[in-house]
Image: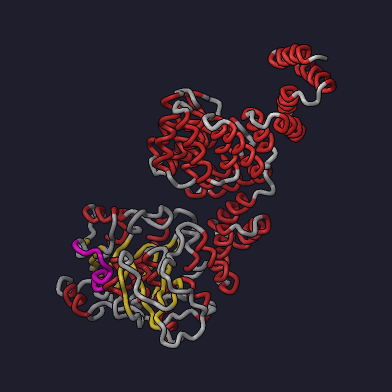
């Protein structure tokens, strides 16, 4: 064939391809190339036909021939890169797309494709830069804006992601995927209400989308609308019965609500669909642990770690299960995984990590983490650091500064928002239990290891009736009450019926407003209303005959001060309270009252009420 004849044959092949007659198009391409193997457009068309047939590996070979023959054609480079990317050859695709850009720098498609390759390889900065360049060339490019929304969110730049997502939808209001990505960004930014509205718009665009219902349920859950979230998870599963992610999300929410049987049923369905999914085994282990089925929980969590050895969340859950059993030998080393889950431990001090050897007078910065109760519980280890020759210094939340200053042989106490005290080495406070190889029988449990300021104690003593039986009450965590561990003040109504008792609120945070609506007959003071620090809390507690509290920082402070303390616990309590014990090896003066079943505070408070009656009429101790 002459070149004009080849050109006519090629145009005919293109016509067949556009009309969907792929076999005829492929046959003509083959004939053209048999006459002229250097006819680049035919190689390109052949590659396109092979891509349509789902053969990217063979398509790559054809596109490569076209590129070799006409390297200046950006279109050929772009399609070669797409074929490479579809096979997971992302580094090669990045090189190819970069060559396409070199061939035609003003073409937004090259930058879009480059962004996609970077995105697939999880190189967010490269993806962001490429998508932004594509948009700079073609401002009305909703697909690039949508992808930019996703990668900005992955990079933690959620405010910018929201802006990009909003622009994509403004350009193309019926862009379903852009609604999902914008909703995800809003949810990550904590704007659950707005995310709900966007996901609802996505469902209006595509009513049979299980992904949209699953994402809507995530947003509803974050917004506190858990009943609606459960229904939408169920809709997602109804639309796609093999949607393992929605089944797992449903199970996690059911577990939070105390429906462990429902959670396990959902998880087992998900596991049948994905038997090698470590995340599902982790959720099963967590749910079994919440039921107190620790041996089964440990088996499931071990399986999760076998499937994914670097699965730090499963390792931490396994640590909790071992520790709840009192198996510190296995639990404490795994507890070190907490540094890789959630908020990292602040080790920004330039001081190196302590190796556990004799400190020979060096200053050691003990880094705090997690909640106030954790700091109070583990500060007991500071004297042991002193015994190693160290001079311990600490940074703590503002509310603990005055309480801890001058106690537990701490050399210096600074606020968490202040610069770190100078130190030669540093170490996480909660890791000291593992460093010192703590076992159940070797917990340093000599109390009190914290005490109240005598001057403040005397000030509160003058404001309390010494002839009454005085009880300090705390019924909820300070910041965001844990629904499992907290209960409303009204639940303590049976205690108001006991004569000769005066109650004093130790409560802080949003639930302190309940002080103004005590149960009928309860005399309840709020002497801590003007104080936020724990030094004043400790001083008031020192004047109490008894502390009654849920599992919160007040429980740890009372135990650390050696006060008579009753702690009301959920059915499967936090690991530090172990299982099936009414005492605590951490705090000798504490008595534990446990739910007989999940959510049953009524039985717990009835037991507390009976125990109170037996002691309240005794002569109050001298204050």
Q: Position of residue 535 (x, y in %)?
A: 26, 72
Residue at x 52%, y 24% (from the top left corner) = 207
- Which quadrant is home to the N terminus? top right
Above or below residue 439? Residue 83 is: above
Q: Residue furthest left?
A: 462
Left or right of 234: which side holds 54?
right
- Residue sitting at 57 percent across and 33 percent down? 110
Q: Residue at x 47, y 63 (%)?
A: 574
Relative to 443, say whether 44 is above or below: above
Is residue 521 toward the left or the right of residue 578 in the image?
A: left
In the rendered image, residue 80, in percent from the top left (x then y), is placed at 68, 33
- Residue 361 screen position, x and y as percent: 41, 87
Query: Along the line of sight, which residue is nearer the eye, 42 or 544?
Result: 42
Is 285 covered by the magenta stretch? no
- Provide the major secondary structure of the magenta segment: helix
Work out which quarter of the rendered image holds the C terminus and state it.
bottom left
Number of callouts: 0
**Residue 179 visible, this orientation:** no
Using the rendered image of the protein, determine whether residue 256 is visible from the camera's viewpoint: yes
- The image position of residue 155, as x and y in percent, is 48, 46
Which range is magenta? 530-541
Residue at figure coordinates x 40%, y 75% from the top left? 365
Indicate whether residue 540 is drawn in magenta: yes
For residue 374, above or below residue 521: below
């Amino acid at each position: 064939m002459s070149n004009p004849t080849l050109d006519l044959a090629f145009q005919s092949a293109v016509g067949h391809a556009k009309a969907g007659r792929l076999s005829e198009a492929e046959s003509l391409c083959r004939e053209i190339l048999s006459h002229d193997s250097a006819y680049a457009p035919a190689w390109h068309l052949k590659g396109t036909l092979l891509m349509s047939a789902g053969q990217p590996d063979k398509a790559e070979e054809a596109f490569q021939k076209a590129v070799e023959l006409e390297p200046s054609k950006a279109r050929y480079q772009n399609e070669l890169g797409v074929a490479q990317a579809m096979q997971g050859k992302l580094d090669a695709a990045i090189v190819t797309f970069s060559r396409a850009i070199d061939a035609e720098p003003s073409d937004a498609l090259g930058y879009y494709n480059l962004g996609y390759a970077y995105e697939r390889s999880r190189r967010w900065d490269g993806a962001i830069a490429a998508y932004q360049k594509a948009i700079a060339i073609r401002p009305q490019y909703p697909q690039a804006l949508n992808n930019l929304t996703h990668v900005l969110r992955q990079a933690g730049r959620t405010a910018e992601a929201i802006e990009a997502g909003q622009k994509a939808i403004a350009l193309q209001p019926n862009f379903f995927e852009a609604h999902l990505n914008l909703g995800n960004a809003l949810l990550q930014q904590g704007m659950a209400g707005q995310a709900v509205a966007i996901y609802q718009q996505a469902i209006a665009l595509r009513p049979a989308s299980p992904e949209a219902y699953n994402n809507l349920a995530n947003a509803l859950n974050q917004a506190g609308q858990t009943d609606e979230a459960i229904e939408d998870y169920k809709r997602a599963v109804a639309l796609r019965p093999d949607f393992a992610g929605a089944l797992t999300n449903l199970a996690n929410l059911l577990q939070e609500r105390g429906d462990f049987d429902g959670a396990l049923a959902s998880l087992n369905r998900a596991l049948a669909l994905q038997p090698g999914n470590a995340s599902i085994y982790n959720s099963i282990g967590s749910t079994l642990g919440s039921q107190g089925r620790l041996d089964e929980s440990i088996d499931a969590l071990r399986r999760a770690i076998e499937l994914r050895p670097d699965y730090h969340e499963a390792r931490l859950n396994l640590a909790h299960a071992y520790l709840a059993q009192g198996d510190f030998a296995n639990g404490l080393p795994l507890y070190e995984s907490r540094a890789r889950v959630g908020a990292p431990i602040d080790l920004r001090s330039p001081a190196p990590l302590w190796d556990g050897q004799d400190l020979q007078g060096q200053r050691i910065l003990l880094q705090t983490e997690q909640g106030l109760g954790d700091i109070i519980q583990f500060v007991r280890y500071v004297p042991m650091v002193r015994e190693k020759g160290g001079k311990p210094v600490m940074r703590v939340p503002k509310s603990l500064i005055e309480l801890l200053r001058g106690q537990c042989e701490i050399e210096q106490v600074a606020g968490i928002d202040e610069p770190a005290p100078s130190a030669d080495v540093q170490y996480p406070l909660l890791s000291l239990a593992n460093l010192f190889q703590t076992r159940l029988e070797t917990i340093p449990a000599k109390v009190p290891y914290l005490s109240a300021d005598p001057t403040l104690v005397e000030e509160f003593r003058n404001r309390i009736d010494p002839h009454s039986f005085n009880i300090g009450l705390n019924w909820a965590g300070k910041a965001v009450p844990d629904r499992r561990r907290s209960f409303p003040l009204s639940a303590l109504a049976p205690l108001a019926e006991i004569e000769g008792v005066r109650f004093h609120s130790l409560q802080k945070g949003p639930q302190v407003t309940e002080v103004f609506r005590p149960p009928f007959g309860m005399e309840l003071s709020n002497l801590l209303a003007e104080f936020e620090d724990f030094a004043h809390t400790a001083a008031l507690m020192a004047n109490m005959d008894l502390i009654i509290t849920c599992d919160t920082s007040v429980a740890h402070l009372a135990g650390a001060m050696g006060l008579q303390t009753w702690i009301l616990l959920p059915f499967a309590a936090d690991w530090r309270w172990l299982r099936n014990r009414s005492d605590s090896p951490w705090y000798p003066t504490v008595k534990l009252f446990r739910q007989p079943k999940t959510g049953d505070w009524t039985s717990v408070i009835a037991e507390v009420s009976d125990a109170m009656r037996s002691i309240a009429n005794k002569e109050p101790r001298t204050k």
